[in-house]
Image (cartoon, helix red, strand yellow):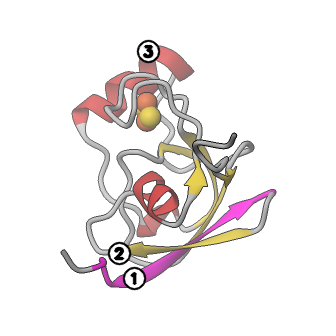
């Protein structure tokens, strides 16, 4: 299997991590591929909203939200505000963006003894 070809970037504040995001790849999937932890409970199924990211710049560059994402944000965050927050596990990019999500960090090495 070949690596996805990066075509946009997502700068994540406050850490300053810059993720290369491939076409049709979600922001959270790009973080995982690059070895970063991104907060999640549901594992990327648009059910927990734990992955939510605040949009600093580039809302117009993000994919359309699915009905499932809209529903989850309304239920858990109280409203669907696509100009200010999106689910990182559902959002793909058409251009570079800057988002804010605390807790994004390098993953802990597994199997430490
Ligand atoms: S990881 Fe659960 S909604 Fe995105």
Q: Label 1 to label 2, Cα distance in Å?
A: 4 Å
Q: Does dot 2 land on a helix, a strand or a loop?
A: strand
Is label 3 in contact with label 1 (beta carbons under 8 Å)? no
Residue 103 percent across, percent down from the top left:
72, 43
Q: Residue furthest left?
A: 1
Is label 1 in contact with label 2 (beta carbons under 8 Å)? yes
The residue lying at 53 percent from left, 37 percent from top is 51
Q: How many marks?
A: 3
Marked residue nearer the N-terminal end (3 or 1) = 1
| Vertical relation: 49 (above or below) 109 | above
Residue 80 percent across, percent down from the top left:
46, 32
Identify the residue position indicated by label 3 in the image.
75
Q: Does dot 1 land on a helix, a strand or a loop?
A: strand
Task: Tell me the number on the disc at residue 6.
Answer: 1
Q: Which residues are magenta?
A: 3-14
The 10 Å Cα crowd at callout 2, few under 14, some 14 to 19, many 20 or more, is many
Identify the residue position indicated by label 2 in the image.
22
Q: Quadrant of the C terminus?
A: top right
Residue 48 percent across, percent down from the top left:
45, 22
Magenta region, mostly helix, strand or loop?
strand
């Amino acid at each position: 299997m070949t690596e996805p070809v990066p075509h946009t970037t997502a700068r994540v504040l406050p850490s300053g991590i810059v993720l290369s995001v491939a076409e049709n790849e979600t922001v959270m999937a790009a973080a995982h591929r690059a070895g970063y932890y991104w907060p999640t409970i549901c594992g990327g199924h648009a059910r927990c909203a734990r992955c939510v990211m605040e949009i600093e710049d580039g809302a117009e560059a993000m994919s359309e939200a699915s009905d499932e994402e809209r529903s989850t944000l309304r239920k858990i965050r109280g409203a669907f505000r696509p100009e200010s927050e999106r689910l990182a596990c559902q959002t793909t990019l058409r251009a570079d963006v800057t988002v804010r999500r605390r807790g994004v960090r390098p993953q802990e090495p597994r199997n430490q003894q």
